[in-house]
Amino acid sequence: MQPVSILSLCTQTPPHVLTQDEAIAAARDLIGWQFADFERLTAVFGNAGVHTRQLARPADWYRSPRTFQERTQAYLEVALDLWVAAAERALIEADLRAEQVDTIVTVSSTGIATPSLEARAMARMPFRSDVARVPVFGLGCAGGATGLGLSSKLARATPGSTVLFVTVELCSLALRTDRADKADIISTALFGDGAAACVLRSGEDGFVQITGSEEKTWSDTLDIMGWQAEPTGLGVVLNRAIPVFAQREMRQAMQEMLDPQGLKIEDIDQFICHPGGAKVVDALENALSLNQGALVKEREVLRDHGNMSAPTVLFVLDRYRRAGLPGLCVLNALGPGFTASSLTLRCAA
């Protein structure tokens, strides 16, 4: 299989920073009254592994009830700004112009945009009128890995073409204040907003090559993670059993994804994982027989940004890249489906 190179990788966050102490105070004011045992439940904030995260809007914006229309307008404005900022930086790093992009893949599941974000970005960036657009919705936290895998397949299918992959998620816009449940407490403790962009092309010119892309979806797991439509917008579905599921299932799933490439778990120099939460990171270390604390960059990203859904694993990849990637890595993420998505990465010499 011809390799596909990642020529550049850039990340972007909105400017509004919220500390975990501020998040607890906000949750107490906004949804705490709906739980008789709220103070006991606040332990999740201390266990989440998050110190700060960045939000689409200033903290006070979330203190007022928001309609679906208001949330959508915030998504369209902020997500587009982040999309453009990440894409422009990725193209600069790759020493390319917008006019040289042949295909744009956009992954986002936290808002609805029709026309999609890359179409809106064409008013601000000089993409060609014949650029191929591939907007993808519904991947959730797996979207960074799955979207990157899809982008690599498109680049491989047309050798020499340039693919721009951008993922943007504004998880904070899903905060429910009218009828919150325990999933809302967990999401308030855990999620943040962000974006990432990569430029890909077939060949071996980038900082790392994608040599494999695999997925596994478990049957009868639709209730583990996702969205449900509500009058005020998208409401989070989040099962607290995810860490247990990951620890029980991920070793076999990972080996199944590596089998078509003739690889074993023991062959991998570095796993690069989506940090769904502190307990999920612990579960992945146990499942993959890694040393405790081995997923250090995952914990750093979770600490500094929270779980931003799809872009998060690319933030992790960027930190490993800057520290120096070993020869053989596997990037992986879990998301709605319930699905595991993985990419095999070989570092450029």
Image (cartoon, grey):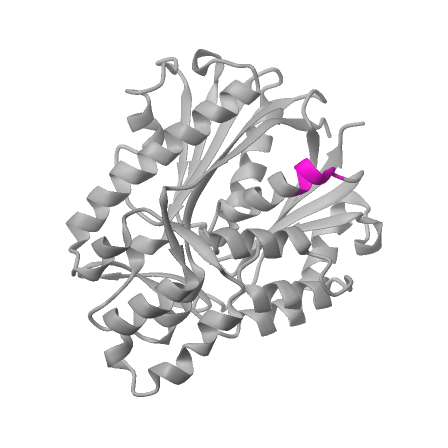
Percent of width and height locating residue 24: 36, 69
User: In the image, is residue 160 part of the stretch drawn in magenta?
Assistant: no
- Which quarter of the rendering shows the N terminus? top right
For residue 189, which quarter of the picture? bottom left
Give the magenta-colored segment's residue range. 320-325
For residue 243, which quarter of the picture? bottom right
- Residue 62 higher or lower than 90, as above or below: below
Percent of width and height locating residue 179: 23, 73
Percent of width and height locating residue 201: 61, 22
Q: Is residue 109 visible?
A: no
Nearer the observer, 339 or 127: 127
- Residue 291 higher or lower than 305, as above or below: below
- Residue 246 higher or lower than 270, as above or below: below
Left or right: residue 319 versus residue 12 is right
- Which quarter of the rendering shows the C terminus? top right
Q: Is most of the magenta stretch helix, strand or loop?
A: helix
Q: Can residue 257 be seen in this view?
A: yes
Residue at left offset 49%, top offset 69%? 220
Residue at left offset 49%, top offset 67%? 221
Percent of width and height locating residue 27: 31, 69
Residue at left offset 54%, top offset 56%? 302
